[in-house]
Image: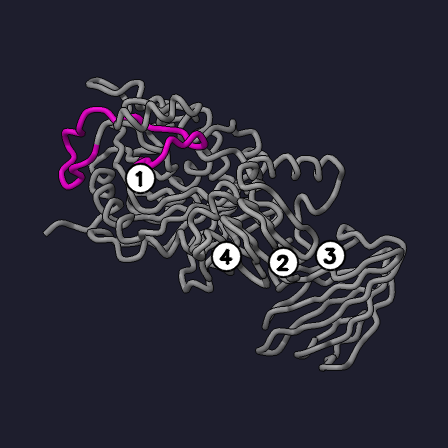
């Protein structure tokens, strides 16, 4: 009886998704959003590796920017799949991220096969995906580096391509496996049409499988500088609950490179007998894949009405065709329009022709140059203890709606420039104010004078909802002096 392959899901969650603004923002990117189903894109990525034939599944591993750590840990908890979250102190592209994951995997298991998946892709035919992953697991367990090429159905200019070569001699159950002939960049339309007609070109999905030891050895051959930096950062790191931290200063010195450039293209270029690199293999995949890179791509994967429209939230459409309208709160009404994208959030509205959604990034760049917060953060901001929504602001005042989850504890803190008035709407608050500690119940309030040490907790089993009114000469989030924090901030 064949021993099942130990499969370690590795989810790379480092992208900022700026082309999906205003829903996706730098501080809360698209992989953390529920765009296609009730699950977020990250949660859907973790779910789709369940029930793969021939493998023993390890707990998921997510590599992410440390700024997202609490939201990601909470999303994994809601799935009932707590796993390891490897924190990058700064972004260094996918090759260092995968190298950290391989080091973490070897530390916790006996050289598992890594299934490397971006956190922000959509796959609609999960069963087809699982069948191909099951084939790839056997190839990877035997020493190959496997990638998945999406069978193209159109001359797409927005994706890179993989040219498949000769059949892989050791394919076994992966009967459709081919050696990788080469990787090519995003083509122009004429070239993409030629690729589609030629029949050996597949879209580059960014999905990979290999043993952890195979990846580390390949990095040692192709990019020893990256491997050395990651090893040093890993050795300087520590385990912080579910979070694996690495040496910040050392990782910041690590060169930036992608999986494709660092290893995969070199594997393709050096294929053949006598190569120091493992064989590179591509498996074709037809599973309703999309990288959801822009709003037009999301429109393509969502269910549409008879006129090709997608409407989510409070939306009314009259005589519209092929339009995507998403509302987070306010009513959107569209009349007599075609091929539009309309997205409403609490603090921004996007209106774009579907053919121009790739240019949304230019709007985000402009917002950042102007120093506007809408380019990077939502009005509603998530924290490890819950969330707050800045509902109103003016000269010397700001109003926030604060939700503290059961058991949530804010830091013991003080402000130099503002006072705060707290009104409990529902639930019970445990308040520390100076040397006092007391409970504030529904319809009760308390005042925190400027310069007073204070803390807010939810000791109950239901969410605590409250209104905070800030007043003072400066109301920025950086006017916080923390004395104690259970979340290590």
SS of the residue at dot 3? Answer: strand
Callout 1 touching callout 2 (CB < 8 Å): no
Residue at (61% x, 74% y) in the render: 463
Callout 3 touching callout 4 (CB < 8 Å): no
Spot occupied by residue 414 in the image (x, y as percentages of width and height)? 79, 60
Judge the density around disc 2: few (<14), some (14-19), many (≥20) Cα neighbours within 10 Å.
some
Q: Which residue is labeled 1 in the image?
A: 209
The label nearer to you, 3 versus 1, is 1
Which corner quadrant of the image does residue 175 belong to?
top left
Q: Which residue is labeled 3 in the image?
A: 482
Say which label, 3 or 1, has the lower sequence index: 1
Q: Which residues are magenta?
A: 149-177
Spot occupied by residue 480 in the image (x, y as percentages of width and height)? 77, 55
Which corner quadrant of the image does residue 196 belong to?
top left
Find the distance from the CA under tag 3 to the CA under tag 1.
43 Å
Find the distance from the CA under tag 3 to the CA under tag 4.
33 Å
Residue at (55% x, 55% y) in the render: 319
Say which label, 2 or 3, has the lower sequence index: 2
Q: Residue furthest left?
A: 1
Q: Which residue is labeled 4 in the image?
A: 34
Say which label, 3 or 4, has the lower sequence index: 4
Spot occupied by residue 400 in the image (x, y as percentages of width and height)? 75, 63
Q: Is residue 153 magenta?
A: yes
């Amino acid at each position: 009886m064949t021993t099942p392959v130990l499969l370690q899901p590795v989810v790379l969650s480092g992208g900022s998704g700026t082309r999906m603004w205003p829903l996706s923002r730098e501080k809360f990117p698209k992989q953390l959003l529920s765009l296609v189903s009730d699950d977020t894109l990250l949660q859907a990525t973790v779910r789709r590796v369940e029930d793969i034939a021939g493998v023993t599944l390890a707990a998921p591993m997510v590599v992410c920017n440390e700024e997202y750590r609490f939201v990601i840990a909470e999303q994994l908890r809601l799935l009932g799949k707590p796993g390891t979250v490897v924190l990058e102190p700064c972004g260094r592209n996918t090759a260092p991220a995968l190298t950290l994951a391989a080091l973490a995997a070897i530390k916790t298991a006996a050289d598992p096969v890594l299934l490397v998946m971006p956190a922000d892709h959509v796959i609609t035919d999960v069963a087809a995906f699982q069948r191909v992953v099951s084939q790839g697991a056997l190839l990877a367990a035997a020493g190959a580096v496997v990638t998945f090429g999406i069978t193209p159905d159109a001359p797409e200019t927005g994706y890179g391509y993989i040219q498949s070569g000769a059949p892989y001699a050791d394919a076994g159950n992966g009967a459709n496996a081919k050696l990788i002939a080469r990787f090519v960049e995003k083509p122009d339309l004429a070239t993409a049409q030629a690729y589609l007609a030629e029949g050996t070109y597949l879209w580059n999905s960014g999905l990979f499988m290999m043993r952890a030891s195979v990846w580390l050895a390949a990095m040692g051959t192709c990019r020893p500088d990256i491997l050395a930096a990651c090893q040093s950062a890993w050795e300087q790191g520590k385990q912080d609950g579910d979070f694996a931290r690495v040496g910040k200063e050392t990782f910041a010195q690590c060169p930036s490179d992608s999986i494709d450039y660092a290893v995969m293209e070199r594997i393709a270029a050096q294929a053949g007998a006598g190569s120091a690199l493992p064989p590179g293999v591509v498996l074709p995949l037809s599973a309703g894949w999309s990288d959801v890179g822009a709003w037009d791509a999301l429109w393509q994967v969502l269910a549409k009405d008879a006129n090709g429209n997608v409407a989510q939230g409070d939306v009314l459409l009259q005589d519209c065709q092929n339009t995507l309208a998403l509302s987070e709160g306010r009513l959107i009404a569209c009349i007599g329009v075609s091929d539009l994208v309309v997205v409403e959030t609490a603090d921004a509205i996007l209106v774009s022709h579907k053919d121009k959604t790739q240019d949304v990034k230019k709007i985000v760049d402009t917002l950042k140059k102007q120093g506007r917060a809408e380019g990077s953060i939502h009005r509603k901001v998530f924290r490890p203890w819950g969330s707050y929504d800045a509902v109103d602001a003016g000269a010397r005042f700001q109003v926030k709606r604060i939700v503290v989850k059961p058991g949530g504890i804010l830091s013991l803190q003080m402000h130099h420039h503002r006072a705060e008035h707290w009104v409990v709407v529902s639930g019970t608050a445990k308040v520390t104010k100076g040397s006092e500690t007391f409970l504030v119940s529904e319809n009760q309030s308390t005042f925190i004078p400027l310069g007073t040490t204070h803390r807010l907790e939810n000791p109950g089993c239901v969410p605590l909802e409250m209104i905070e009114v800030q007043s003072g000469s400066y109301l920025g989030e950086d006017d916080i002096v923390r004395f104690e924090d259970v979340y290590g901030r």
